[in-house]
Amino acid sequence: GTVRAAYLDLCQDVERLSFFLVALRPYQRLANSAGDLAICWLGKCLSHLLQEIEKLMVQLRQNRLEVMHSAYQRLQELAKSDLRGNPSDKRWMQGLRHIDEVQLEELHRGICAQCTELLAATTVAKMSELQGEAAQGLQDVIRSFQSPEFQARCALSLPDAVMQDTLQLL
């Protein structure tokens, strides 16, 4: 009855979550090879996928709670009845003890937190932050090249064109 219907809804949500997670694989490969800046550039596409996953996670949690509620109701009904006639009901009741709701909730929160983190990584603010860090890194390199200590260690000084080219990158 209701337990099976709720369970089928839950399975459908898990299947839909799998679909969206598979759709994220190319973005993961891109992030691994091109870095965070590439993810920022693809923010619109990626944020749409992540928003769908977040909506699905809410629905998945709701359906999981509904399954557990239905299962506990069924457990109470079976506990009140005589179990000698149906060993499958007894096995089902015993199987419920293997469900770790605390772990399921922690996993749910972890996935939601990762979606939020990824969404934050796609924002314009994150792109500006990454560009600022890159510019600061280049300025540090230029300062090091121009320092008297570095120049003293070099047999020949760096051509002025190298410094001008590096400054143009900023």
Image (tube, rainbow, N blue to C red):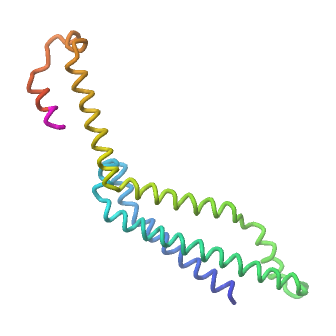
Main secondary-structure element of the magenta-colored stretch:
helix
Q: Is 55 displayed left or right of 1 in the figure? A: left
| Residue 125 at x, y percent in the picture | 33, 51
Q: Is residue 71 above or below residue 116?
A: below
Q: What residue sits 84% from the left and 82% below the top?
A: 87
Residue 97 located within the stretch drawn in magenta = no
Q: What residue sits 64% from the left and 64% below the top?
A: 104
Q: What residue sits 37% from the left and 64% below the top?
A: 47
Boundaries of the magenta span: 166-170
Quarter of the picture containing the N terminus is bottom right
Report the residue that reaches farthest toward the front.
Answer: 125
Q: Quadrant of residue 166?
A: top left
Q: Is residue 154 above or below residue 89?
A: above
| Residue 82 at x, y percent in the picture | 91, 86
Q: Is 21 displayed left or right of 146 in the figure? A: right
Q: Is residue 79 above or below residue 154?
A: below
Q: What residue sits 14% from the left and 15% below the top?
A: 157
Q: Is residue 29 above or below residue 158?
A: below
Quarter of the picture containing the C terminus is top left
Q: Is 75 displayed left or right of 6 in the figure? A: right
Q: Is 154 displayed left or right of 40 in the figure? A: left
Q: Quadrant of residue 131?
A: top left
| Residue 71 at x, y percent in the picture | 73, 79
| Residue 3 at x, y percent in the picture | 69, 84
